[in-house]
Amino acid sequence: MQSWRNKMMTNYFLIIGLVVIFTISITIVSTLVILKIVSWNWITGVLLGTITSYTSFLLVSKSARLLIKTENHYFLYFMFLLRIGVYFITTVTVLLLNDLFAIEGFLIGLVNSIFYPFFKYKSV
């Protein structure tokens, strides 16, 4: 078991790395918008697609953990339908509010969910 200090140092380096990545990506996005290469609705579409894919991944990992713990297959069906609902609601939102969200950006943001099965997570 790690000591408290080792855990804090690990989290400290993780936070520094995430802040650096966040700063670089915000700088790149701001530069693209200022130079009018992309518009804001494209950026909001990418953000909505990314949030949707991460939400679906969290639902899948939580349902897998709870299925192992409780062995309730009806809960797994419920979580599957909930994940399909998350995809459906956000897709309909993007299609109806096309002046606020760009469908191309939304689809690019959803690409993250394609690569989840290729990684092995210890929690699933």
Image: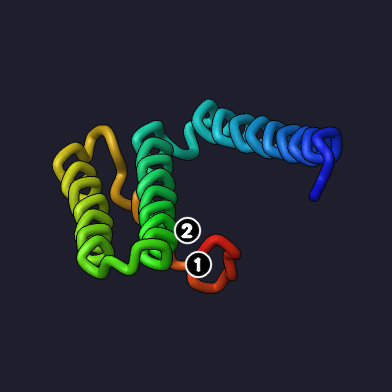
Kindly indicate the quadrant of the structure image that contains residue 98: top left
- Vertically, is 117 above or below 39? below
Kindly indicate the quadrant of the structure image that contains residue 16: top right
Label 1 Cα neighbours within 10 Å, binned few <14 / some 14-19 / many ≥20: few
**Callout 2: SS:** helix
Mark 2: amino acid: Asn
**Callout 1: SS:** loop
Find residue 115 and name its label: 1
The answer to whether residue 108 is visible is no
Find residue 95 and name its label: none
Mark 1: amino acid: Phe
- Vertically, is 12 above or below 56? above
Task: Answer left or right for 46 relative to 76.
Answer: right
The residue at 42%/38% (across/down) is: 43
The residue at 25%/69% (across/down) is: 73
Residue 19 x %, y %: 69, 32
Find residue 112 and name its label: 2
The answer to whether residue 114 is visible is yes
Task: Answer left or right for 124 relative to 15.
Answer: left
Kindly indicate the quadrant of the structure image that contains residue 8: top right
Task: Answer left or right for 103 relative to 13.
Answer: left
The residue at 80%/38% (across/down) is: 13
Residue at the extreme front: 70
Front in this rendered view, residue 16 or 72:
72
Task: Answer left or right for 10 relative to 15.
Answer: right
